[in-house]
Amino acid sequence: MADGAATQSQIELCSPRGNDFPGTSTETLLTRDALELARVGKKEVMKRRFRLASTIGFASSLMITWEAMMIQFGVGLRNGGPPGLIYGYIGVWIAFLSIFIAMGELASMIPSAGGQYHWTSILAPTSSKRFLGHITGSITIIAWETVAVGNYVVSASVLQGTVALSRPQYDPQGWHVTFITWGILLVSLLIVTYLGVVLPAIEIFILVIHIFGFFAVLFSLIALGPQTEPRPVFSMLVNLGNWHDITLSSFVGLQGTAVAFVGMDGAIHMAEEVENSSMVVPQSMLLAIVINGALGFAMLLTILLKSGDIQALLNSDTKYPFMFVLENSTQSKTAAIILSSMLATLTACAGLSTLASGSRMLWSFSREKGIPGWNWIRQVHPRTSLPNHSIFIIVIATALISLINVGSDYILNITLSLIMQAFFSSYLIPLSLLLYRRMQGHIADPKQADLDPDKPYTWGPFRVKGWLGIANNMFSIVCLVIMFLFGCWPLQNHPSPREVNYSIALTGGATVLAVVYYVGWARRVYRGPVVEVRVYRSGQR
């Protein structure tokens, strides 16, 4: 790819008529990032404030793997026990590494904030580009909105749990969680709008707290926790879900582990604010998954070895077993409250990053006229270049959905159960299309793109070449299918109505609504990614 100087002298940017986007008719491209974005039809609007370190921080704060494993490990503990948790964690870690290597290839080819829907629209067959692109965009927006609610509500719920731990006479109420959620949400709104220009620095700070917090909890458990013999712990098979065998039970228990890795595609939706995006975004995702995977695995082993009586933990009726572990290990309510509060804070930081990435996804889809009110939502602040309108939409939607908790946290949990399925669906569609295109040989090497005019697509600078790339692409799809299927299972065999996993029904219902919306209205205005600009070499026009 041409460097900055060559780009300036050889490339021109032209805005097609009738695209409804303001801008000058012709201008010279100054950067490689602007050229790569223009090649997929998009004009550079955002300011590129993120670099490698801040993007790693952003991706890590979205994953919060060690924190999520502390909060969610009870799912795998009851279905599979310690061995199922450990081997399941390793399997899920490898699966997500494969998935995001393939996602990184797409992010390098098409470095757009739209991510999944933009990739789908470009790679899909001509007859289904618009339909598949719009459905993928709708599912991705649903995924980001539900995970935003999940992060904020879990953070508020953990804070409520610390109050209950410190004051046994406290009577927890659902509306308390909602009000705490609103308070955290308001702070996040102020940060991503008024302090949005320094968000990269904030994300680096969160990364530091994320790592130091890990060591604070780890050393507390190691130093103060009871000594446990490893052999009895790691040979303790648990099947409290009453499934037919322990293997099936362990696969069902993967749900708690998988949720600790979803959402890292948030870095993709920040692509238009990242310098050297086609390389930095894939690299940051892989570095984040390696770092977070290692921290999460170390924390999981420590919890299992330092939690004391595993059977007592299984019999505990606490909402969050990690609070039981912290109090039991440290023998101090104060220490448990402090460490739990830190977990709640880091989960709120994940909500902050979710708000940033989800708003970029919504903004990007609005510029394609894919949602109602697109003309207002797509606007960015003229001074800060931040999509404030889309940020407000995400905040308002999150606040409204959290109101469900006032009536019933059970109904809210049903609503949030589609998080994993929505994310997995949004990954599966473009990765399947990528496999199809690479198997057909439709993607050209960037060095030979001009010599291969019959190939309509060009690889970015980040990719896995040859058969290894094909094998990884296939493996990522198989992993997604497995996690999608077992993510639909209830945690208990023959579940009661309150134990039923409604995720498949909600995912199917959301998809049907997206199809109805597309057929009834969107297909008349949505034409796929709008070509805002075209690239010409000097003298070519």
Image (cartoon, rainbow, N blue to C red):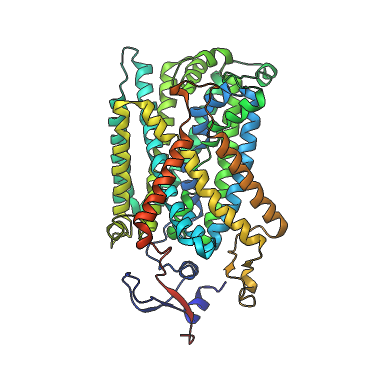
Q: Nearer the viewer, residue 530 or 395?
A: 530
Q: Could you tell me residue 408's position as x and y percent?
A: 33, 26
Give residue 349's position: percent from left, percent from top. 40, 39
Query: Going 33% across and 76% down the picture, which residue do you hit?
Result: 24
Does the image show residue 115? no
Q: In this rendered view, identify the residue nearer to me: 1 or 423.
A: 423
The answer to whether 126 appears left or right of 272 in the picture is right
* Vertical placement of residue 434 versus 407, above or below: below
Depicted 194 relative to depicted 306: above or below: below
- Where does the image place residue 417, in percent across and percent down from the top left? 45, 34
Front position in the image: 313 or 137: 137
Q: Residue furthest bottom?
A: 539
Residue at x 35%, y 62% (from the top left corner): 524
Q: Decide if residue 134 is in sight here.
A: yes
Q: Is residue 101 left or right of residue 16?
A: right
Quadrant location of residue 339? top left
Query: Picture coordinates of residue 56 (x, y %)?
Result: 51, 49
Residue 177 sits above or below residue 334 on the image: below
Residue at x 37%, y 64% (from the top left corner):
45
Snapshot quadrant of residue 354:
top left
**The N terminus - image quarter:** bottom right
Total number of numbered discs in the rendering:
0
Q: What residue sits 37% from the left and 36% below the top?
A: 152
In the image, is 339 to the left or to the right of 90? left
Residue 175 or residue 30, whichever sits in front: 175
